[in-house]
Image (tube, grey):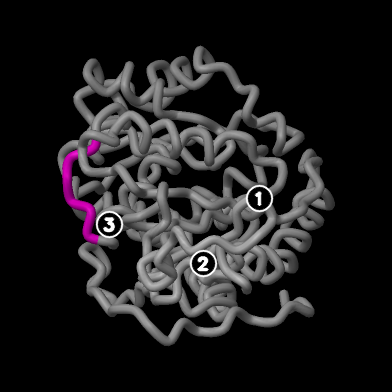
Amino acid sequence: MSANFAKPVKPIAGQSITGTLSGRPIFIPDVNVPPMPSIAPPGPIHNGGPTKVFDIAKLTDGHPDACSYRRRFGLLIPATNTTMESELWNILVKNRDNGLDGIGLHTSTVVTKPAVADKAGLEAFKRDFLSGVQNAVGTASLAQPQYLIMGLSLEHIVVGLNSIRETMAELATYSPLSWATWHDAIAAAFERYKVKRIGILTPWENVGNASGVRMFEDMGVEVVANVGLSCANVQQIAHIPNEAKEKAVLELLATKENKLDAVVQCGTNMSMTAVTEKLEPQLGIPILGINATILWYALRENGFSAPVQHAGRLLREF
């Protein structure tokens, strides 16, 4: 998985906080250390020449990012993913008056091949993604994020919870920052809802779908029913219609016979927020879509505790 890219230098200024959900220490770098912004000589110019209108000391006195002044999240996604960033921004923008103003997403992509119709394609996707993460982290570091989000269902390409944790532990060495991951986020959500029985919805074919089932079983949760929509191209996952997702949830997963505690959706390129908002009121159980759940985890770990609207029960209730 290693690549020829210098690791970001660990920030020397910042604070350590304790993750609200994980209980783990999280280092939040101070990205406003003066001089911020630094000024190139000879200083501010007017019509091509120096001007003394500005007080340099005030101009460089540790000013925050005008948009991401509360937290900068670095988001790493496959280059084929057209959904996750949009879905997360949609939640953030709709909740700017609910305490999420000043939170920004800064996305870095990992180049991957889109075809995953067979085992060889899936292996190629896995190889490309894992080998490309270090470069993507290096690129993301140029925006000086304060926390990272892994925008991929690792269980799609890595089999078994222990292997997923080992893989993520290696990827985490590429940055001094803490990460929000799907396997940590969904485990925290399961704990809040006391989940024991789930149905899962994925966009994957049989091999990837079975790997998803395996991760949840390794967590000690019973997968009562599972649906894989068998997309042969990971970019095209974004084109799955909401009608198909609703049919899977209502007719195959959250049936009276299955007696589920929750529906879980995997695959960050498959949007689920609109379906969640529509179906949760009639189902009486949570729908835990990956993108909203990972954002919930990132926000709560970073101390943003206000209820979040328009993204499902989890973000409103916990």
Q: In percent of the image, x 60 and y 58: which residue is there?
A: 45
Q: In percent of the image, x 43 and y 35: which residue is there?
A: 225
For label 1, the SS is: loop
Few, some or many C-alpha atoms within 10 Å of disc 1 (few <14, some 14-19, many ≥20)?
Answer: few
Q: In percent of the image, x 65 and y 56: which residue is there?
A: 157
Q: Which mark is residue 188?
A: 3
Decide if residue 189 is on the left or right side of residue 263. left
The residues tagged by marks 3 and 2 sit, at their Cα atoms, a distance apart of: 27 Å
Between 20 and 38, the one nearer to me in the picture:
38
Q: Quadrant of residue 40?
A: bottom right
Going from N to C along the chain, the mark reached first, 1 or 2, is 1
The residues tagged by marks 1 and 2 sit, at their Cα atoms, a distance apart of: 32 Å
Q: Identify residue for label 2.
A: 144
Q: In this picture, which residue range is highlighted in magenta?
A: 303-308
Q: Identify residue for label 1.
A: 47
Residue type for callout 1 = Asn
Q: Quadrant of the N terminus?
A: bottom right
Few, some or many C-alpha atoms within 10 Å of disc 3 (few <14, some 14-19, many ≥20)?
Answer: some
Name the front one of labels 1 and 3: 1
Decide if residue 316 is on the left or right side of residue 123. left
Q: Residue furthest top?
A: 243
Residue type for callout 2 = Gln
> Residue 278: where, in percent of width, then height?
33, 16
Decide whether the magenta segment is chiefly helix, strand or loop.
loop
Residue type for callout 3 = Ala
Q: Is residue 48 above or below residue 292?
A: below
